Image: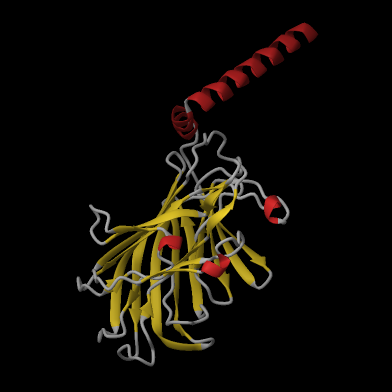
Amino acid sequence: MKSQATSSLISTLSLLLVVVLWASINPQKSIARGLANHQSLSYSVEQVKVGSATEYRFKLDNRHFGTLIDHEGTYAFRPHPGCDINGWGSTWYGQPFLPNSKLKHTNIESTIADSKGIHVNASGMVSRGTSDTYGTWSSVIDFVYNPVGQVINGTGLYTITLPGPLTDATGDLNLHKIASNYLDDVPLLSGGTGDTGDMREAVVRRDPGSIWFAWIPPNQPSHFPTDKTAFLSIDVIGEFNNVDTKAMGYEPIAPAFKPSLKVDLTLQQSEAVITFGGIYNLAESQCFYCDNVGITPLISKTNSSTEFRFDVLVESVALETCAYLPLTMKP
């Protein structure tokens, strides 16, 4: 009996080794096989209080693929489509605000998970200054996760209503914000110095089929082209962040694969009113823990409209590839 048990154990371990090696060589086939054996994938939302913030952690089975953070009134979505445990990069603040405002006044009304995804219903006030407001907004966005391609997609409707036209006193209307980190000329774990961080560049389109321009923050620290469009796509390309923080006099941090973050806005009125805005804080160009990049598509204060309705698409793709074998495995 002991010999038979030993033989059975050896056979099981050998089979497991073959599966692991085959998965590392053929990750996509391995993923497909794993999904075929787990047809009933289950979405869920785990609500967690972290200090003064409430986190809504989006999960497919036990894969934590993104978090929506309400920190004193923010709508801050942080995607995590990949397997790297440190693969949290850029953040999308899906709420409108006027210049130099503290982002507040969001109400996450519901986060409902079912077999088709996670459905987020939110509303709030347009932030103005430190505590004032100027109008209202609402959004309904459905989030889904594809574990094979390691892609998050969110699609929905985003509406903003102002009490009156924009003026010199209000300034431009910022439609949302993508916050990220770009490190310029820092020591790298691979040796020497170079650029790294959470993003490589922002690819901007005003036509889905062609690139308008690619924005590299240190090359144009303040970039506000005057061209207007009814469709604006901003794709913040992810990066392998391998900054050597020890060489900078800090505790060492592990290198990490940072995912992309793309946000598309399509104005339903089909008026060319959206413009691109990008700011890079040169004073923080080597601050590895700072959100030194802010991308804020906007509507100029010269526009007289008071209501805007957008189709919105949010997408995040992992930079790395990995097998998704047991669905219960956490990233």
Q: 64 or 214, which is in the foreground?
A: 214
Query: What residue is shown at x 60% (from left), y 40% (from top)?
Result: 329
- Residue 188, percent from left and from top: 60, 47
Q: Is residue 286 above or below residue 175?
A: above
**Residue furthest front as drawn:** 192
- Residue 229, percent from left and from top: 24, 69
Q: Is residue 59 visible?
A: no
Q: 224 or 228, which is in the foreground?
A: 224
Q: Quadrant of residue 174?
A: bottom left
Left or right of residue 313, residue 50 in this image: right
- Residue 109, percent from left and from top: 49, 72
Query: What residue is shown at x 50% (from left), y 70% (from top)?
Result: 75
Query: What residue is shown at x 27% (from left), y 59% (from top)?
Result: 212
Q: Is residue 143 visible?
A: yes
Query: What residue is shown at x 42% (from left), y 41% (from top)?
Result: 149
Which part of the image, by quadrant, shows the N terminus? Answer: top right
Left or right of residue 286, residue 299 in this image: left
Colour scheme of the picture: secondary structure
Which part of the image, by quadrant, shows the C terminus? Answer: top right
**Residue furthest left as drawn:** 270
Left or right of residue 269, residue 265 in this image: right
- Residue 7, percent from left and from top: 71, 9
Left or right of residue 54, residue 137 in this image: left
Q: 245 or 132, which is in the foreground?
A: 245
Numbered label tally: 0
Q: Is residue 318 above or below residue 120?
A: above
